[in-house]
Image: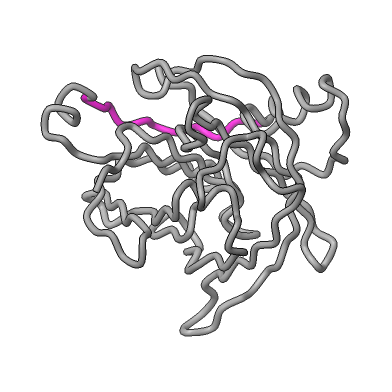
Amino acid sequence: MIKVVFSAGLILALSGCLDTFGQMRDAIMNPDPEVEMVIPGVNRAAIEQADLAAVLMLSPGTGIAAVGIAIQMRDGRIIYNANDNRGVTLDGGLIYATLGFGTNLQAVTTQSNDPLVTEAKAGDWPAEVTRTYHVSQRGTVFAQFTAVCRNQVGRQLVIDVVDANRRVVEVLETCATQEGDTFNNIHYLDAATGRVWRTNQWTGPVQGNMQVDVIDQFAP
């Protein structure tokens, strides 16, 4: 059973307290009120047999969920598309762009050692990362939001990612924009490699957080 994950607009201070970490994690993953979302069925065996790289995409802000298949690699980023013209582009574990889930995220520019892009193990993350989000507005106009994200490492655990158990480490990011707005991301990294199996990331002020579950990793 896939756990339905919904984003939350959190305005909480990051601290070293494990109880606070747990409260923030639960608020990101299970906000109140929840938005109804129909999760598409996923045939993991068929995906693995066909040797496809695939992701499950959940957009709580719009109540849309879809399964995306890797269709292209461009500049090292993997583009995943669903049949209904929805998709995400992943740069490592970073949600680089989105399509068809609301207000499209066009791109995220970040520093060369961004641990989501380099897929670093939790213990090797820098103390903070600066990212700039380029979000669609009307026509060819884009809004830009620059945020500094600081991280805290949480539990080691086993999660169910579309009927497959993954041993992961959770990492919480608390982010603040130059304008003083705040948001939070949470990532579940492979305990051995640092690759992302599940991530819940901010994708803009209107669309909010999206979750991506990696059903089967892309292997060039």
Quarter assignment of residue 162: top left
In the drawing, does residue 141 fall left or right of residue 185? left
Magenta stretch: helix, strand or loop mostly: loop
Give the x, y percent position of residue 94: 51, 51
Which residue is rendered at x = 70% and y = 25% of the image?
Answer: 154
Instruction: Identify the residue at the far left of this view.
Output: 50
Quarter assignment of residue 69: top left
| Viewer-proximal residue among 219 and 39 | 219
Quarter assignment of residue 101: bottom left
Number of marks in the rendered image = 0
| Viewer-proximal residue among 111 and 39 | 111
Which residue is rendered at x = 55% and y = 31% of the image?
Answer: 188
Which residue is rendered at x = 41% and y = 23% of the image?
Answer: 161
Q: Check the image and tell me how it is coloured.
A: one colour
In the drawing, does residue 162 fall left or right of residue 160? left
- Tell me: residue 132, above or below residue 11: below
Q: Which quarter shows the N terminus?
A: top left
- Tell me: residue 120, above or below residue 4: below
Magenta extent: 33-43
Give the x, y percent position of residue 30: 63, 27
In the drawing, does residue 5 fall left or right of residue 160? right
Give the x, y percent position of residue 215: 33, 32
Give the x, y percent position of residue 179: 82, 68
Residue 129 magenta: no
Instruction: Identify the residue at the far bottom of this view.
Output: 140
Which residue is rendered at x = 69% and y = 30% of the image?
Answer: 32
- Tell me: residue 202, above or below residue 187: below
| Viewer-proximal residue among 123 and 176 | 123
